[in-house]
Amino acid sequence: MNETVWLRCPVCGNKTRLKVRHDTELINFPLYCPKCKQETLINVKKTNLSVIKANTQIQKENIEL
């Protein structure tokens, strides 16, 4: 049976809204933390999280639909 693990924010250490399984791989994934409101670019392989780039400030973009 595949167990799932909560992804934790690399900035504040709290749980994010994502779970990963042991066979999940994420490359250049933008992980957003609702608690500290930071977005961090990460890689995940076999539940090991590595930070690529941490944004210190989130910039809002104006998108017209």
Image: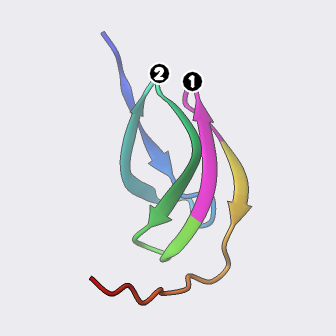
Q: Residue at x 63, y 65 (%)?
A: 11
Q: Quadrant of residue 64?
A: bottom left
- Asked if the magenta segment contains residue 52, the reply would be no
Taking depth in this image into account, of 18 and 15 the one nearest to the observer is: 18
Q: CA distance from mark 2 to mark 1?
A: 5 Å
Left or right: where does residue 28 sit relative to residue 16?
right
The amino acid sitting under disc 2 is: His
| Helix, strand or loop under label 1 | loop
Query: Considering only order in the chain, which callout, 1 or 2, is on the residue closer to the N terminus?
Result: 2
Circles 2 and 1, Cβ within 8 Å, touching? The answer is yes
Q: Is residue 38 above or below residue 41?
A: below
- Say how the picture is coloured: rainbow
The amino acid sitting under disc 1 is: Lys
Q: Residue at x 30, y 9 (%)?
A: 1
Residue 46: mark in rendering = 1
Q: Is residue 40 above or below residue 20?
A: below
Q: What percent of the width, then of the height, locates residue 3?
A: 36, 21
Magenta region, residue range:
40-49
| Helix, strand or loop under label 2 | loop
Q: Which residue is denoted by mark 2 in the rendering?
A: 22
Dot 1 surroundings within 10 Å: few (below 14), some, or many (20 or more)?
few
Q: Residue at x 51, y 51 (%)?
A: 8
